[in-house]
Amino acid sequence: MRNKGVIDFTRAFDSAWERMLVILFRPFDLGKWFAIGLSAFLAGLLAGGNGINGSFNNDFNNLNKSGKVQMPSFNLHQFNSTIFQTFSGMQAGLVILIVAGVFLFVFAFILLFYWLGARGQFMFLDNVVRNRGAIAWPWHYYARQSNSLFALYVFFLVAGFALILPIIAVAVVVAISPYQQHRWPAGWEIAVFVILGLLYLGTCILWGSLVFIFREFGVPLMFRNGLTARAAFMKSIGLIKDHCLSVAIFVLLRIAIWIGLAILSLLVCCVTCCIEALPYIGTVILLPALVYVRCFSLDCLAQFGPQYDVWTVDVPATEPTVTPPPPLG
């Protein structure tokens, strides 16, 4: 008998494949396909995109007569001089205003993507779990939880910057002296850079893994049990503590699946002449893979116990029965 809390990944792979076939192909409905694709596309805004939608740029102008690529030369002193001359002719207040405007513009776009992505997470879950192509109903029904998820992701964004900014600040301070003296960093400076690089990499991996586990396990618990983002995040932490080995294997498998999706996306991009790289269109093309991956995560989560089984979303969460005390008097 399988140990409680130990994920049977083979079972999850097989079950996810069958669920994907039922959702998308039994029967095939083009309208439903595009509706689920829209929800998957919006969900990907919070997950950093679905698959790898990229393009390859070949600079044929840099080919010399020998057929080799001639890399453009880069003069650091000339670049610094150009930058200095550009900004020296501008007033300091105008420079600050431009920088602040660009920052606010980028930050506003990030917030917009987070807000749409939070709605998309619940829309995609609803369409996958309930096997339908609904847009309006889940958009409105899960508005409260979507706003809670959006607020938590904004906190993740701020907290992530707070964690890495001190590391970047120390690296900049250490780099000032070699830059001003036009010299190669000394041995102790290189050691500091290496340590800071390892701290930065470790922080990104740990923080990214934590956010990833919450998105894969915590958001479905919000969807199933009507939890707020904070409560679901704490439950995700509890899963990590109680089932650290299974969760670690799950993360490694998801990394392998992500690599497979990236390769698949590049192949499809080449076959479709980069049509797959277009927003939303690429999600629609890769929808079977995206639905399969989501089903796999949900099937893994369901094996932790009935209270984690998102496929029974219309069944109330398992809670202990509390007998009310008898009335006084």
Image: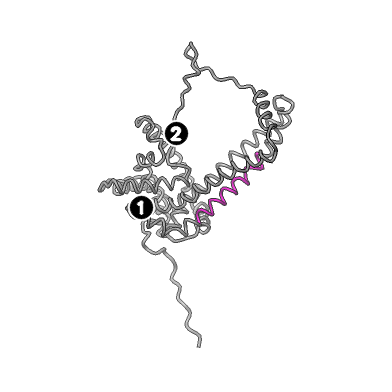
Label 2: few (<14), some (14–19) or many (≥20) C-alpha neighbours in 10 Å: some
Colour mapping used in the image: one colour
Q: Position of residue 46 (x, y in %)?
A: 48, 47
**Residue beneath the point at 36% across and 33% down:** 268
Q: CA distance from mark 2 to mark 1?
A: 27 Å
- Position of residue 176 relative to residue 43, above or below, is above
The picture places residue 76, in percent across and down from the top left corner, at 65, 24
Along the line of sight, the residue nearer the viewer: 285 or 327: 285
Q: Position of residue 93 (x, y in %)?
A: 69, 41
Are the residues at dot 2 and dot 1 in contact (C-beta closer than 8 Å)?
no
Q: Which residue is mark 2?
A: 54
Look at mark 1 in the image and give the residue it sits on: 127
What amino acid is labelled 2 in the image?
A: Gly
Q: Which element carries disc 2, helix, strand or loop? A: loop
Up/down of 82 relative to 162, above or below: above
SS for callout 1: helix
Amino acid at the residue labelled 1: Asn
Viewer-side residue, 296 vs 175:
175
